[in-house]
């Protein structure tokens, strides 16, 4: 697909429901007692994988509208082992969170995924679940992941070796099934997104949170009558960056999830001179939500360190693009986790941007960009099947001088079907 340069981006938009929260709503709805009504469900390739997975486990889900689902929960221990392996598609969040729930079921479950997912580490969940008394086997740390349980789980105190919301979530979910009185605690090296903790609280679970730790006690049942999913900050981010970089832009993005553990990009853009105003702040089911008003700005370079990485992990490729147009040298350190995403995003993002004329170098744990406050040149890049790369290429195209040809652009639908149409609807021709 070819993305032509735009003059400005302008108008009012809303983005799809948050992907992380949509996965969690289906998974918790599946093991709740009674119905869970999910509104503004973020339908995407990844969340369709979760929908298929919970159905394969015996859960009935009615699709009342594209973004309105009714999950008929089967209760905490009511999931049924399917005969066939569960295909998690491209969804890392699914293959890492689901084992937490399966720990408390009886049976043998096999989880696998597409080629990209089968290259990604799952030993990070196998290891703590093993300590909790669940048998989990992997193919040298990668999928397929085979889990066998008799439903008995031991509570543990677990210090996460990496800052990962997915691993934290898997351990907390398994902790719901621990033998009576056992309290499962997870300590994180750096704060990661806490959607699981917030949704567990909505479902009636007592979650104790102190500094960098979160604990759950076993429960008899969950009740999650409804989840209203906020707009996905990670889906808003490409529009925030496009509007920031294109002089004269004025874009309003309504109903965006602003969980403070997700919005690192906003803090970083602010210190670079970005002009993003948040208004109409509210809370939707425990999650912070607001509207964003983005104006174009001249950016200056900045350094992003390890402590800021988890809060903007999925936005780092877009940060690289913003940094390419900022005055001076920017860098990211402590982001080695990027190498374990749908692609090795240190490699794929830096080589894609280099092909478009950006002076960027990969580092073992991040990258370094020499920014120039003009339009990047443009050219051709390949998403490599990675949705965040397809979206990066598209934003690079609209802010470039000559446009960008994005190979394998349809990968964007893994997180954001309709992305290109929405981008086109706000792009005013140069
Ligand atoms: C996610 C957590 C992050 C993030 C991913 C979604 C989640 O992954 O990159 O897109 O929904 O919990 P890690 O837990 O591997 O950091």
Image: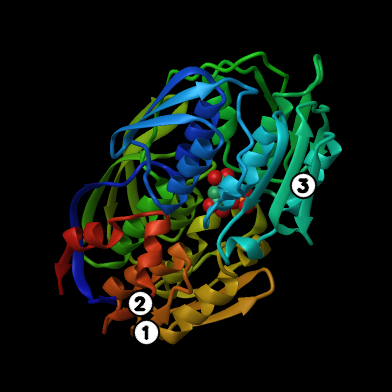
* Position in image of residue 75 (x %, y %): 58, 20
Q: Label 2, on which residue?
A: 406
Number of labels in the image equals 3
Q: CA distance from mark 3 to mark 2?
A: 36 Å
Left or right of residue 65: residue 173: right
Disc sitting over residue 126 in the figure: 3
Near-viewer residue (101 or 338): 101
Residue 136 in view (yes/no) = yes
Name the residue: 49% across, 37% down.
Answer: 55
Left-right relation of 221 to 398: right
Badge 3 element: helix
Q: Quadrant of residue 149?
A: top right
**N-terminal of the two: label 3 or label 2?**
3
Q: Quadrant of the C terminus?
A: bottom left
Q: What is the residue that sits farthest to the front in this orientation?
A: 83
Q: Which residue is painted at 23% across and 67% down in the image?
A: 247
Q: Nearer the viewer, mark 3 or mark 2?
A: 3
| Residue 120, image x, y percentages | 65, 61
On-image quarter of the N terminus = bottom left
Confirm or reject: label 3 Cβ below 8 Å from ligand 1.
no
The 10 Å Cα crowd at callout 1, few under 14, some 14 to 19, many 20 or more, is: some
What residue would you read off at disc 1?
380
The percent position of residue 67, horizontal first and vertical second, equals: 31, 37
């Amino acid at each position: 697909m070819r993305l032509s340069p735009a003059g400005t981006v302008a108008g009012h938009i809303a983005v799809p429901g948050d992907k992380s929260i949509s996965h969690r709503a289906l998974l918790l709805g599946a093991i709740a007692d009674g119905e869970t009504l999910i509104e503004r469900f973020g339908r995407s390739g990844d969340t369709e994988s979760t929908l298929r997975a919970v159905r394969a486990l015996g859960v009935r889900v009615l699709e009342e509208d594209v973004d309105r689902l009714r999950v008929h929960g089967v209760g905490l221990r009511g999931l049924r082992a399917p005969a066939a392996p569960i295909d998690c598609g491209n969804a890392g969040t699914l293959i890492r969170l689901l084992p937490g729930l399966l720990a408390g079921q009886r049976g043998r479950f096999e989880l696998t995924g597409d080629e990209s997912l089968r290259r990604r580490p799952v030993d990070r969940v196998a290891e703590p679940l093993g300590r909790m008394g669940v048998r989990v086997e992997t193919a040298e740390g990668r999928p397929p992941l085979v889990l066998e349980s008799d439903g008995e789980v031991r509570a543990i105190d677990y210090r996460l070796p990496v800052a990962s919301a997915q691993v934290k979530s898997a351990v907390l979910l398994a902790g719901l099934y621990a033998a009576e009185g056992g309290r499962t605690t997870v300590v994180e090296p750096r704060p990661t997104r806490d959607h699981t903790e917030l949704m567990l609280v909505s479902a009636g679970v007592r979650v104790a949170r102190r500094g960098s730790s979160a604990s759950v006690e076993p429960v008899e049942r969950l009740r999650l009558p409804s989840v209203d999913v906020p707009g996905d900050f990670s889906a808003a981010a490409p529009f925030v960056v496009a509007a920031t970089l294109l002089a004269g832009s004025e874009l309003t993005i309504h109903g965006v999830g602003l969980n403070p553990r997700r919005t690192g990009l906003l803090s970083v853009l602010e210190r670079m001179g970005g002009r993003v105003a948040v208004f109409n702040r509210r809370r939707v089911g425990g999650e912070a939500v607001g509207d964003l008003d983005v104006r174009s700005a001249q950016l200056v370079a900045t350094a992003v360190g390890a402590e800021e990485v988890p809060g903007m992990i999925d936005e780092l490729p877009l940060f690289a693009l913003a940094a390419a147009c900022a005055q001076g040298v920017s860098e990211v350190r402590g982001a080695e986790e990027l190498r374990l995403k749908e692609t090795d995003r240190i490699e794929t993002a830096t080589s894609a941007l280099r092909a478009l004329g950006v002076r960027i170098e990969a580092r073992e744990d991040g990258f370094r960009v020499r920014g120039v406050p003009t339009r990047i040149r443009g050219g051709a890049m390949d998403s490599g099947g990675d949705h965040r790369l397809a979206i990066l290429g598209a934003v690079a195209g609209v802010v470039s001088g000559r446009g960008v040809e994005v190979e394998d652009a349809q990968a964007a639908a893994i997180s954001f079907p309709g992305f290109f149409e929405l981008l086109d609807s706000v792009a005013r021709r140069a």
